[in-house]
Image (cartoon, rainbow, N blue to C red):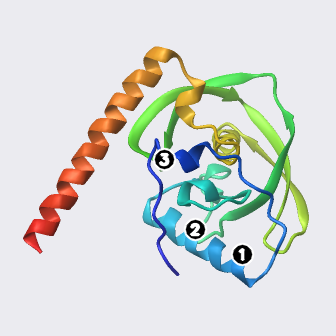
């Protein structure tokens, strides 16, 4: 398994609408394993294929987003070609983070519950419903597949504060990487 590079915002690939998955083969299974390794490496609860530069409607969700008491080794939920079937009218605001915006958290309003229809790694159809954190994780990752990022969903002021923090964080990462290279 390989840890993939997570694309940081504003990489233009994050603005792409992902293509449907049509081939449920060994290549797809390898991609899923690599994405799982990457999500675990980054302590994420969700990840979309577009975040690692893959043009496919594929996302992963950690089971802890649906059940905080689940076993630590419970398998991730593989979601392919998701379609939103239903969203609640009730909404709530809660803090969201994103692997493409490391260490940036903003308040985002979303539906409190959602149900989607999707395919698993074998191509079989299933439905899953999420409430609160589960709904937030599902919708956040589907947004990625549609070229939408979390800062698109907030006020101009929140967006500019989040982007400034993100730019500072990215500069710090570059400096730390350069410092490490000089020591090597």
Q: Label 2: few (<14), some or many (≥20) within 10 Å?
A: many
**Residue 102 vertical position relative to residue 25 in the rendered view, above or below:** above
Residue 28 marker:
1
Whole-percent x, y for residue 11 in the image: 48, 47
Whole-percent x, y for residue 148 in the image: 63, 37
Distance from disc 2 to disc 1, alpha carbons, whole Å, reads 10 Å
Distance from disc 3 to disc 2, alpha carbons, whole Å, reads 18 Å
Q: Say whether residue 117 is left or right of residue 131.
A: right
Q: Which element is circle 3 on?
A: loop
- Which mark sits nearer the N-terminus, 3 or 1? 3
Residue where numbered disc 2 is placed: 35
Residue sticking out furthest to the front = 12
Q: Which element is circle 2 on?
A: helix
- Which mark sits nearer the N-terminus, 3 or 2? 3
In this view, the mark in front (3 or 2): 3
Residue where numbered disc 3 is placed: 11
Q: Residue at x 91, y 62 (%)?
A: 125
Q: Label 3: few (<14), some or many (≥20) within 10 Å?
A: few
**Residue 7 vertical position relative to residue 35 in the rendered view, above or below:** above
Q: Which residue is drawn at 47% across and 29% down?
A: 106
- Compare residues 116 and 58 and report the one nearer the observer: 58
């Amino acid at each position: 398994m390989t840890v993939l590079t997570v694309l940081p915002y504003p990489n233009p690939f994050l603005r792409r609408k992902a293509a449907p998955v049509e081939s449920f083969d060994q290549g797809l299974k390898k991609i899923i394993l690599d994405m799982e390794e990457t999500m675990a490496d980054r302590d994420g609860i969700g990840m979309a294929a577009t975040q690692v530069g893959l043009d496919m409607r594929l996302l992963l969700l950690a089971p802890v987003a649906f059940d905080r008491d689940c076993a630590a080794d419970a398998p991730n939920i593989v979601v392919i070609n998701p379609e939103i079937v239903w969203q609640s009218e009730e909404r709530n605001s809660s803090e969201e983070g994103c692997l493409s915006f490391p260490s940036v958290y903003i308040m985002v309003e979303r539906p409190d519950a959602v149900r989607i229809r999707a395919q698993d790694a074998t191509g079989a159809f299933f439905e899953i419903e999420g409430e609160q954190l589960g709904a937030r994780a599902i919708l956040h990752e589907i947004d990625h597949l549609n070229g939408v990022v979390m800062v698109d969903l907030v006020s101009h002021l929140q967006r500019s504060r989040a982007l400034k923090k993100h730019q500072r964080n990215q500069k710090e990462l570059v400096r730390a990487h350069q410092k490490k290279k000089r020591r090597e």
